[in-house]
Image (cartoon, rainbow, N blue to C red):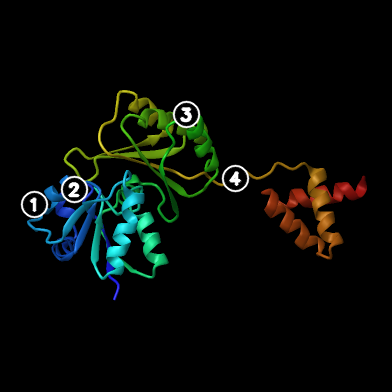
Amino acid sequence: MTGVLVLAGTPIGDPADAPPRLSAELAAADIVAAEDTRRLRRLAATLEVTPTGRIVSYFEGNETARTPELVEALAGGARVLLVTDAGMPSVSDPGYRLVAACVERDITVTAVPGPSAVLTALALSGLPVDRFCFEGFLPRKQGERLSRLREVATDRRTLVYFESTHRIAEALAAMAEVFGPERRAAVCRELTKTYEEVRRGPLAELAEWSRDGVRGEITVVVEGAGEPAPEELDDAELARRVAVRESAGEARKAAIASVAGEAGVPKRRVFDAVVAAKRA
């Protein structure tokens, strides 16, 4: 029998947020793969649990090299617990490569759900959460950063970003430039920690505020783009569009209603445009 890979969420701040199953998995795992082994040992001590399995490091620098080793252990029947410094593995953290390798080998992958900075920030932002897109970290270079932001400038979903204290001011300024200074956003820092803060406002205002420096772990939530403005059509174009629909077999009344809806104008205006075109 093959083993099981367990992805476990860890606290993003307050250790009391650790799911109860995390302690059980720490005690039962044959191997615990941790992004930072020292932080893992501190967390285990706080939770008053002693890992009985082997503890190995699994971080960005050795993820590629260590993945085959863990996969072989799993193939041999080991129970491997994967934890990162905070939140869920794979979400801007190590984990994706190992999960993909396990799926390819038909090795069972399960999870211990836990804290997530993305969902916590979304819930606290006050912005729509029915549709959202997680964009991770923006590129370090300004040109690449602006290019990435332009890709989603018209996206109507709420956008979520992670950002570092050293680049938050530049990131917010770039967002204000690309998305517009009045686009609403929320900067969430130190979530669930002693100095938790959620700053809400237009991007231009937040960019100005951030110039003095913002400390801590930061998640930025940005409002999606609004409804696109209706295309401005003159009367001649309105009449032409009705004529096209009529030539395709659509009744004039229905064609006028359809064109009015598409253009965002009153049906009476479209009707008058059609009459004027007939007289011309």
Q: Position of residue 215 (x, y in %)?
A: 26, 32
Q: Earlier in the sequence, mark 3 or mark 4?
A: 3
* Residue 5 appears in the picture as rendered: no
Q: CA distance from mark 1 to mark 3?
A: 42 Å
- Residue of label 1: 45
Q: Vertically, is 223 above or below 175?
A: below
Q: CA distance from mark 3 to mark 2?
A: 34 Å
| Residue type, label 4 | Pro
Asked which secondary structure carries label 2, the reply is helix
Q: Is residue 138 rendered to the left or right of residue 52?
A: right
| Residue type, label 2 | Thr
* Residue 165 appears in the picture as rendered: yes
Which label is found at residue 142?
Answer: 3
Q: Earlier in the sequence, mark 4 or mark 1?
A: 1
**Residue placed furthest toward the right:** 280
Seen at 17% across and 58% down, the residue is 54
Q: Earlier in the sequence, mark 3 or mark 2?
A: 2
| Residue type, label 3 | Gln
Asked which secondary structure carries label 1, the reply is helix
Q: Earlier in the sequence, mark 1 or mark 3?
A: 1
Q: Position of residue 142 (x, y in %)?
A: 47, 29
Q: Badge 4: how crowded within 10 Å, few (<14), some, or many (20+)? A: few
In this rendering, the label closer to the viewer, 1 or 2: 2
In this rendering, the label closer to the viewer, 3 or 2: 2
Q: Position of residue 74 (x, y in %)?
A: 29, 66
Seen at 86% across and 46% down, the residue is 276
| Residue type, label 1 | Ala
Q: Badge 2: how crowded within 10 Å, few (<14), some, or many (20+)? A: some
Q: Are marks 1 and 2 in contact (CB under 8 Å)?
A: no
Which label is found at residue 37?
Answer: 2
